[in-house]
């Protein structure tokens, strides 16, 4: 890990914070992988950097967070027989991923001993191995009938901090789900509930009544994964449940806009977070988070800088992460972007608000450069330059 990282000549600094999405600064200094100072370069100690980047007037955002993925092992997914899908997502600006369950493992164990073993192993291998540097928060067991409170304590004691989507296993009744979600919460395990129609064989419909009764921490893919609930149920969940409103790429786009607009109408935009729900039947979307940002900014009548907050600071706070915000003390995880070459719009934000994707020029995780010019986004007008490190 680099000891000192300096990013200078930043043209636009996106904070990830809804209350103040654009910062008046042109330089970031990080020490030992954490943000140490933000401001004007002339006022900061930028000498003797181990890693130094000239942003060349491009934008810097917190690294994007995918709130909903289904990893299996390493950087391979049998769901689409695809290698290096996580690396491809890094080239779409994603530096952190949250597992919603390792459900695509062939022969996934559904007995209690087996599901606990899988969750613990998954948590360990992504703790010990970061594909291309990406922080994958893995080990998310799918709960099954017969689990008791001690099972959740065992999982927590072993380091498991997430539940897979409630409803993908045999627990589909609201009353049972509520009890297990309560046990998980007691031991510091965060929960997500499947919302909408069946997504894979063995899953089922989870409607608003089950979601409300279960009271999981995150309303997983409220816009369907893939099939959304009726409009009135989506509005009801936004209005009657105070939990995270997760919008995913592999869902119903019209329903995503409905949920976001409802959150805005009730003054709770801080609940909106973004995911892809990949790998899935729709495949892997390396640019899925950027595409969701462009969708919401162009069709949802929100500023592009606000949409970036959904994929960074909102998720960080909802998920209790130490990344996703440009603040002193947070992890030095960044994506450097610029308006795509020949894209319409006066600048990158306006171009995104017209529905265009930006070009990714670099990603940085814990202060270390993890990728440069993206192989997946349209080419950026201006690329940052690695000066050192």
Image: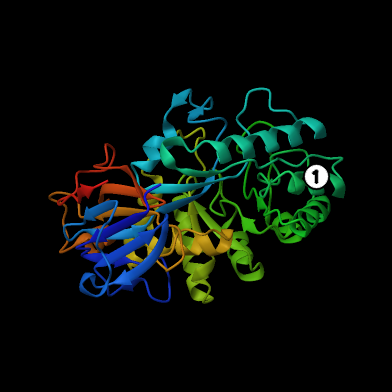
Q: Is residue 257 above or below residue 278?
A: below
Q: Which image quadrant for residue 142?
A: top right
Horizontal side of residue 11 vs 181, given as left or right: left
Q: Residue furthest left?
A: 342
Q: Is residue 86 above or below residue 48?
A: above
Horizontal side of residue 380 vs 106, given as left or right: left
Badge 1: residue crowd in 10 Å (few <14, some 14–19, many ≥20): some
Horizontal side of residue 284 vs 266, given as left or right: left
Residue 356 x/y as whole percent: 25, 52
Q: Residue at x 53, y 53 (%)?
A: 223
Q: How is the image coloured?
A: rainbow
Q: Residue at x 42, y 68 (%)?
A: 327
Q: Residue at x 43, y 41 (%)?
A: 133
Q: Secondary structure at mark 1?
A: helix
Q: Is residue 70 visible?
A: no
Q: Is residue 2 visible?
A: yes
In this view, the residue in front, 273 or 257, is 273
The residue beneath circle 1 is 154
Residue 304 x/y as whole percent: 32, 64
Q: Residue at x 40, y 52 (%)?
A: 292
Q: Residue furthest front?
A: 48
Total numbered labels: 1
Q: Is residue 89 above or below residue 304?
A: above
Residue 372 x/y as whole percent: 26, 42
Q: Which image quadrant for residue 219?
A: bottom right
Residue 282 x/y as whole percent: 47, 35
């Amino acid at each position: 890990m680099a000891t000192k990282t300096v990013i200078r000549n930043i043209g636009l600094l996106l904070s990830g914070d809804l209350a103040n999405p654009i910062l008046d600064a042109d330089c970031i200094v990080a020490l030992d992988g954490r943000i140490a100072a933000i401001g004007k370069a002339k006022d900061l100690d930028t000498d003797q950097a181990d890693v130094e980047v000239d942003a060349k007037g491009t934008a810097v955002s917190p690294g994007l967070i995918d709130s909903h993925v289904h990893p299996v092992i390493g950087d391979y997914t049998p769901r689409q027989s695809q290698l290096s899908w996580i690396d491809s997502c890094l080239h779409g600006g994603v530096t952190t991923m949250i597992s919603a369950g390792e459900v695509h493992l062939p022969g996934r164990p559904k007995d209690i001993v087996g599901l606990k073993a899988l969750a613990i192993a998954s948590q360990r291998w992504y703790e010990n191995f970061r594909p291309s540097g990406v922080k994958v928060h893995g080990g998310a067991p799918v709960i099954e009938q017969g689990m008791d409170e001690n099972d959740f304590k065992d999982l927590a004691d072993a380091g498991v901090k997430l539940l897979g989507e409630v409803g993908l296993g045999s627990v589909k009744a609201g009353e049972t789900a509520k009890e297990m979600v309560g046990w998980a919460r007691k031991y510091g395990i965060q929960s997500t509930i499947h919302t909408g129609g069946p997504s894979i064989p063995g899953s089922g419909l989870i409607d608003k009544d089950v979601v409300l009764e279960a009271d999981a921490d995150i309303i997983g893919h409220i816009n369907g994964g893939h099939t959304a609930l009726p409009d009135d149920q989506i509005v009801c969940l936004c209005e009657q449940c105070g939990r995270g409103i997760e919008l995913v790429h592999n869902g119903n786009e019209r329903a995503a806009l409905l949920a976001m607009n409802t959150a805005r109408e009730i003054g709770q935009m801080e609940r909106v977070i973004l995911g892809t729900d990949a790998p899935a039947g729709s495949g892997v979307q390396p640019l899925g988070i950027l595409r969701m940002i462009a969708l919401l900014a162009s069709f949802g009548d929100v500023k592009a800088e606000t949409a970036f907050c959904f994929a960074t600071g909102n998720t960080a706070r909802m998920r209790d992460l130490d990344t996703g915000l440009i603040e002193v003390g947070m992890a030095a995880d960044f994506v450097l972007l610029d308006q795509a070459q020949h894209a319409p719009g006066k600048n990158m934000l306006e171009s995104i608000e017209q529905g265009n994707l930006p070009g990714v020029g670099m990603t940085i995780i814990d202060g270390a450069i993890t990728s440069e010019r993206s192989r997946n986004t349209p080419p950026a007008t201006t690329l940052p330059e690695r000066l050192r490190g």
